Image (cartoon, rainbow, N blue to C red):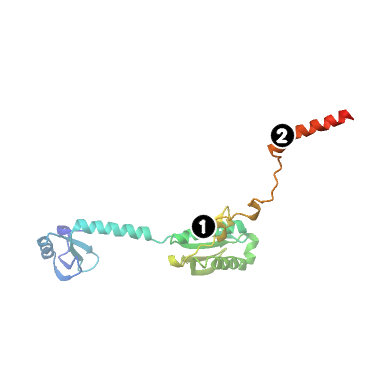
Amino acid sequence: MTRINDRIRAPKVRVVMANGDQLGVMSSREALAKAQSLGLDLVEIAGQVDPPVCKIVDYGKYKYEQAKLKKQKSKSATRMKEVKFRVGTGQHDYNIKLGRAEGFLEGNHKCRFVLQFRGRENAHKDLGFVVLNRIIEDLKSMAQVDQPPRLNGRAVAMILSPLPAHQRKRKFHLFHGELMEEDDFETDEPHEDDIPDDDFVPDEVPDEVSDAAPEAAAEIEAEASKS
Protein backbone atom coordinates (compact mmCIF):
# COMPACT_ATOMS: atom_id res chain seq x y z
CA MET A 1 0.00 0.00 0.00
CA THR A 2 1.37 3.42 -1.00
CA ARG A 3 1.52 6.00 1.80
CA ILE A 4 0.78 9.60 0.89
CA ASN A 5 0.71 12.95 2.69
CA ASP A 6 -0.11 12.70 6.40
CA ARG A 7 -0.14 8.88 6.26
CA ILE A 8 3.65 8.90 6.02
CA ARG A 9 4.84 7.98 9.54
CA ALA A 10 8.63 8.33 9.24
CA PRO A 11 9.99 11.35 11.16
CA LYS A 12 12.41 12.24 8.36
CA VAL A 13 12.25 11.58 4.62
CA ARG A 14 14.42 12.15 1.56
CA VAL A 15 12.47 14.31 -0.87
CA VAL A 16 12.60 14.17 -4.66
CA MET A 17 10.69 16.36 -7.10
CA ALA A 18 8.72 14.95 -10.04
CA ASN A 19 11.47 16.05 -12.45
CA GLY A 20 14.13 14.22 -10.40
CA ASP A 21 15.56 17.18 -8.52
CA GLN A 22 16.79 16.27 -5.03
CA LEU A 23 15.58 18.42 -2.11
CA GLY A 24 17.50 16.41 0.48
CA VAL A 25 16.47 15.02 3.86
CA MET A 26 13.87 16.92 5.90
CA SER A 27 11.11 16.24 8.39
CA SER A 28 7.91 14.66 7.09
CA ARG A 29 5.95 17.74 8.21
CA GLU A 30 8.26 20.08 6.30
CA ALA A 31 8.12 17.86 3.19
CA LEU A 32 4.33 17.77 3.30
CA ALA A 33 4.15 21.57 3.66
CA LYS A 34 6.41 21.90 0.60
CA ALA A 35 4.15 19.60 -1.43
CA GLN A 36 0.97 21.41 -0.37
CA SER A 37 2.48 24.77 -1.23
CA LEU A 38 2.88 23.50 -4.81
CA GLY A 39 -0.62 22.04 -4.91
CA LEU A 40 0.79 18.51 -5.09
CA ASP A 41 1.05 15.39 -2.93
CA LEU A 42 3.86 13.81 -0.95
CA VAL A 43 4.10 10.16 -2.07
CA GLU A 44 6.31 7.53 -0.44
CA ILE A 45 8.06 5.64 -3.26
CA ALA A 46 10.70 3.70 -1.26
CA GLY A 47 9.65 2.95 2.28
CA GLN A 48 12.22 0.19 2.91
CA VAL A 49 15.25 2.51 3.00
CA ASP A 50 16.30 4.80 5.83
CA PRO A 51 15.19 7.49 5.55
CA PRO A 52 12.26 6.66 3.24
CA VAL A 53 12.24 8.33 -0.17
CA CYS A 54 9.23 10.47 -1.02
CA LYS A 55 8.33 12.25 -4.24
CA ILE A 56 6.34 15.44 -4.64
CA VAL A 57 3.88 14.70 -7.45
CA ASP A 58 0.24 14.78 -8.48
CA TYR A 59 -0.86 11.51 -6.87
CA GLY A 60 -3.68 10.86 -9.34
CA LYS A 61 -1.29 11.20 -12.30
CA TYR A 62 1.38 9.18 -10.50
CA LYS A 63 -1.06 6.35 -9.80
CA TYR A 64 -2.19 6.27 -13.44
CA GLU A 65 1.40 6.14 -14.74
CA GLN A 66 2.32 3.36 -12.34
CA ALA A 67 -0.68 1.28 -13.41
CA LYS A 68 0.20 1.83 -17.07
CA LEU A 69 3.82 0.83 -16.48
CA LYS A 70 2.77 -2.30 -14.61
CA LYS A 71 0.48 -3.29 -17.48
CA GLN A 72 3.28 -2.83 -20.02
CA LYS A 73 5.68 -4.94 -17.97
CA SER A 74 3.09 -7.68 -17.61
CA LYS A 75 2.41 -7.65 -21.34
CA SER A 76 6.07 -7.83 -22.31
CA ALA A 77 7.03 -10.38 -19.66
CA THR A 78 8.84 -13.39 -21.08
CA ARG A 79 7.23 -16.70 -20.30
CA MET A 80 8.76 -20.14 -20.47
CA LYS A 81 7.05 -22.56 -22.86
CA GLU A 82 7.82 -26.28 -22.97
CA VAL A 83 7.89 -28.70 -25.90
CA LYS A 84 8.36 -32.43 -25.26
CA PHE A 85 9.91 -35.04 -27.52
CA ARG A 86 10.62 -38.76 -27.52
CA VAL A 87 13.49 -40.64 -29.11
CA GLY A 88 11.01 -42.12 -31.57
CA THR A 89 9.14 -38.92 -32.44
CA GLY A 90 8.24 -39.21 -36.12
CA GLN A 91 8.84 -36.58 -38.79
CA HIS A 92 5.17 -35.56 -38.91
CA ASP A 93 5.00 -34.90 -35.16
CA TYR A 94 8.45 -33.32 -35.22
CA ASN A 95 7.29 -30.77 -37.80
CA ILE A 96 4.19 -29.93 -35.77
CA LYS A 97 6.16 -29.51 -32.54
CA LEU A 98 8.73 -27.22 -34.15
CA GLY A 99 5.96 -25.25 -35.83
CA ARG A 100 4.45 -24.63 -32.39
CA ALA A 101 7.87 -23.79 -30.97
CA GLU A 102 8.36 -21.18 -33.68
CA GLY A 103 5.00 -19.70 -32.67
CA PHE A 104 6.17 -19.42 -29.05
CA LEU A 105 9.45 -17.83 -30.12
CA GLU A 106 7.58 -15.42 -32.38
CA GLY A 107 5.65 -14.34 -29.28
CA ASN A 108 8.96 -13.54 -27.52
CA HIS A 109 8.74 -16.55 -25.22
CA LYS A 110 11.64 -18.78 -24.28
CA CYS A 111 11.25 -22.48 -25.09
CA ARG A 112 12.36 -25.41 -22.98
CA PHE A 113 12.81 -28.59 -25.01
CA VAL A 114 12.64 -31.85 -23.08
CA LEU A 115 13.31 -35.34 -24.42
CA GLN A 116 12.36 -38.13 -22.02
CA PHE A 117 13.70 -41.68 -22.11
CA ARG A 118 11.62 -44.77 -21.43
CA GLY A 119 12.70 -48.35 -20.82
CA ARG A 120 15.54 -49.46 -23.05
CA GLU A 121 15.95 -45.93 -24.40
CA ASN A 122 17.90 -45.14 -21.22
CA ALA A 123 20.76 -47.22 -22.62
CA HIS A 124 21.02 -44.89 -25.63
CA LYS A 125 20.85 -41.44 -24.10
CA ASP A 126 23.22 -40.11 -26.73
CA LEU A 127 20.26 -40.22 -29.13
CA GLY A 128 18.59 -37.53 -27.05
CA PHE A 129 21.48 -35.16 -27.69
CA VAL A 130 21.26 -35.94 -31.41
CA VAL A 131 17.60 -34.89 -31.46
CA LEU A 132 18.13 -31.69 -29.48
CA ASN A 133 21.14 -30.67 -31.57
CA ARG A 134 18.98 -31.20 -34.65
CA ILE A 135 16.36 -28.88 -33.13
CA ILE A 136 19.04 -26.23 -32.53
CA GLU A 137 20.04 -26.43 -36.19
CA ASP A 138 16.45 -26.35 -37.46
CA LEU A 139 15.54 -23.33 -35.32
CA LYS A 140 18.75 -21.35 -35.79
CA SER A 141 16.85 -18.74 -37.83
CA MET A 142 14.42 -18.19 -34.93
CA ALA A 143 16.33 -18.81 -31.70
CA GLN A 144 19.66 -18.97 -29.94
CA VAL A 145 20.84 -21.39 -27.27
CA ASP A 146 20.18 -20.03 -23.80
CA GLN A 147 21.05 -23.29 -22.03
CA PRO A 148 22.72 -26.14 -23.97
CA PRO A 149 21.41 -29.72 -23.82
CA ARG A 150 21.96 -31.27 -20.39
CA LEU A 151 21.24 -34.71 -19.04
CA ASN A 152 19.04 -34.75 -15.96
CA GLY A 153 18.09 -38.24 -14.80
CA ARG A 154 15.83 -39.85 -17.41
CA ALA A 155 15.59 -36.76 -19.59
CA VAL A 156 17.77 -34.36 -21.53
CA ALA A 157 16.71 -30.73 -21.78
CA MET A 158 17.75 -27.36 -23.18
CA ILE A 159 16.42 -23.80 -23.38
CA LEU A 160 16.27 -21.61 -26.49
CA SER A 161 15.53 -17.90 -26.43
CA PRO A 162 14.16 -15.89 -29.38
CA LEU A 163 16.40 -13.92 -31.69
CA PRO A 164 15.69 -10.19 -32.18
CA ALA A 165 12.49 -9.75 -34.18
CA HIS A 166 14.25 -8.44 -37.32
CA GLN A 167 16.48 -11.54 -37.49
CA ARG A 168 13.74 -14.15 -37.21
CA LYS A 169 12.68 -16.22 -40.19
CA ARG A 170 10.22 -19.06 -39.79
CA LYS A 171 11.01 -22.35 -41.47
CA PHE A 172 8.21 -24.61 -40.31
CA HIS A 173 5.18 -23.37 -42.21
CA LEU A 174 2.82 -26.28 -41.65
CA PHE A 175 -0.18 -27.73 -43.41
CA HIS A 176 -1.54 -30.82 -41.63
CA GLY A 177 1.92 -31.51 -40.25
CA GLU A 178 3.65 -31.32 -43.62
CA LEU A 179 6.30 -28.70 -44.30
CA MET A 180 5.34 -26.04 -46.82
CA GLU A 181 8.14 -24.58 -48.90
CA GLU A 182 8.21 -20.90 -49.81
CA ASP A 183 7.14 -21.75 -53.37
CA ASP A 184 3.89 -23.18 -52.02
CA PHE A 185 2.80 -19.68 -51.03
CA GLU A 186 3.17 -18.28 -54.56
CA THR A 187 0.25 -17.97 -56.97
CA ASP A 188 0.02 -21.00 -59.21
CA GLU A 189 0.88 -20.32 -62.85
CA PRO A 190 -1.20 -22.01 -65.58
CA HIS A 191 0.22 -25.38 -66.51
CA GLU A 192 0.94 -26.01 -70.17
CA ASP A 193 -1.54 -28.90 -70.10
CA ASP A 194 -4.26 -26.42 -69.10
CA ILE A 195 -3.70 -24.17 -72.14
CA PRO A 196 -6.14 -24.96 -74.99
CA ASP A 197 -4.55 -26.38 -78.14
CA ASP A 198 -5.40 -24.59 -81.38
CA ASP A 199 -5.47 -27.97 -83.16
CA PHE A 200 -7.88 -29.43 -80.64
CA VAL A 201 -10.78 -31.32 -82.30
CA PRO A 202 -13.95 -31.64 -80.19
CA ASP A 203 -15.47 -35.07 -79.61
CA GLU A 204 -18.95 -33.88 -80.55
CA VAL A 205 -19.85 -33.24 -84.19
CA PRO A 206 -21.13 -29.73 -84.93
CA ASP A 207 -24.88 -29.39 -85.52
CA GLU A 208 -24.52 -28.39 -89.20
CA VAL A 209 -22.58 -31.59 -89.93
CA SER A 210 -24.93 -33.87 -88.02
CA ASP A 211 -27.97 -32.34 -89.81
CA ALA A 212 -26.58 -33.49 -93.18
CA ALA A 213 -26.50 -37.14 -92.14
CA PRO A 214 -30.23 -37.95 -92.81
CA GLU A 215 -29.98 -36.62 -96.42
CA ALA A 216 -26.96 -38.79 -97.14
CA ALA A 217 -28.77 -41.83 -95.72
CA ALA A 218 -31.79 -41.16 -97.98
CA GLU A 219 -29.62 -41.01 -101.12
CA ILE A 220 -27.95 -44.30 -100.21
CA GLU A 221 -31.35 -45.96 -99.71
CA ALA A 222 -32.62 -44.70 -103.14
CA GLU A 223 -29.61 -46.10 -104.96
CA ALA A 224 -30.12 -49.47 -103.26
CA SER A 225 -33.79 -49.68 -104.42
CA LYS A 226 -32.85 -49.00 -108.07
CA SER A 227 -30.41 -51.84 -108.10
Amino acid type of the residue that numbered disc 1 sits on in the rendered structure: Arg
- For the N terminus, the quadrant is bottom left
Is residue 158 or residue 184 the one in the foreground?
184
Tell me the quarter of the picture where residue 42 sits: bottom left
Label 2 secondary element: helix
Judging by the rendered image, the residue that carries numbered circle 2 is: 211
Tell me the quarter of the picture where residue 62 sits: bottom left
Residue 152 visible: no
Q: Residues within 10 Å of mark 2 (few under 14, many from 20)?
A: few
Tell me the quarter of the picture where residue 191 sits: bottom right
Judging by the rendered image, the residue that carries numbered circle 1 is: 100
Residue 166 % position (x, y): 44, 66
Amino acid type of the residue that numbered disc 2 sits on in the rendered structure: Asp
Residue 194 % position (x, y): 64, 51
Q: Is residue 217 above or below residue 69?
A: above
Toward the top, the furthest residue is 225
Left/right of residue 86 with respect to residue 7 in the rendered view: right
Left/right of residue 1 with respect to residue 184 in the rendered view: left
Q: Earlier in the sequence, mark 1 or mark 2?
A: 1
Q: Residue at x 72, y 34 (%)?
A: 211
Residue 141 % position (x, y): 51, 67
Left/right of residue 108 with respect to residue 213 in the rendered view: left
- For the C terminus, the quadrant is top right
Label 1 secondary element: helix
